[in-house]
Amino acid sequence: MKNLIIIGARGWGREVYAAAISCAAYRHGEYAVKGFLDSDEHAFDGLQGDYPPILGDVETYIIQPDDIFFVAMGEPKWRKYYAELIERKGGHFMTIICDTARVVPTATIGDGSFVSYNSIVSDGVVLGQHVVIHAGAIIGHDVHIGCYGTLEALAFVGGKAEIGDESILHVRATLIRHKRIGKRVEVGAHSLVMRNLQDDVHVFGNPARKVEW
């Protein structure tokens, strides 16, 4: 049995914990939740709920043989930072797929990724490592999403579209089919992307246009 350690004990770390203990694999005893790694040992003070312990910070934690990790960082750059730190220590990552997610068997999902409640991952989709798909997001056929990409709640990506590493589609954003956005792109909430986007841009609106963030 593996011992899951969640990196990050803030808001999204707690959401990941709730999802992890709701999965069939947890109920069947395939893994236990050992605790969290966070620099703030008082992160749970004043909160309701019974959480596993904060075991220390990522930098000083010594990995044990049965440990497996999930990086619960909302910002892609920090997800990447801590994932690479754990990789350098020799750690491995768990992929969490909620029971109510619909993932077609032909889809490929990278290590350390998260597919949330009521989301859809269609035929031929490829998700890189440490990709986060939030509740209700829909991914059409043959979509490629690079490592550390994020789809927030109710986002939609049309068939054969591509999303580069570390890019984010915020709540209810849409990327139409066959279009490509580059690396480290941020698409604002409710935006509609109808053309290809280069790396390192922020866009917002319907249709989405470049903005200063």
Image: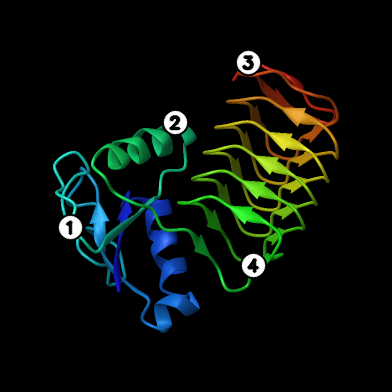
Residue carrying label 4: 101
Q: Amino acid at mark 2?
A: Lys
List the residue tagged with mark 2.
77
- In screen coordinates, is 22 left or right of 89? right
Question: Answer yes or no: do the residues labelled 2 and 4 have beta carbons within 8 Å?
Answer: no
- Element at badge 1? loop
Give the secondary structure at mark 3.
loop
Residue 64 marker: 1
Residue 139: give x, y in percent of width and height: 74, 51
Q: Tell me which label, 4 or 1, sits earlier in the chain.
A: 1
First reached walking from the N terminus: tag 3 or tag 4: 4
For mark 3, what is the residue?
Answer: 212
Q: Answer left or right for 33 relative to 182.
A: left
Which image quarter is the N terminus in? Answer: bottom left
First in sequence: mark 2 vs mark 4: 2
Quadrant of res 49: bottom left
Q: Of marks 2 and 3, which one's residue comes earlier in the chain? A: 2
How far is mark 2 from mark 1, CA to CA?
26 Å
- Identified by mark 4, the residue type is Ala
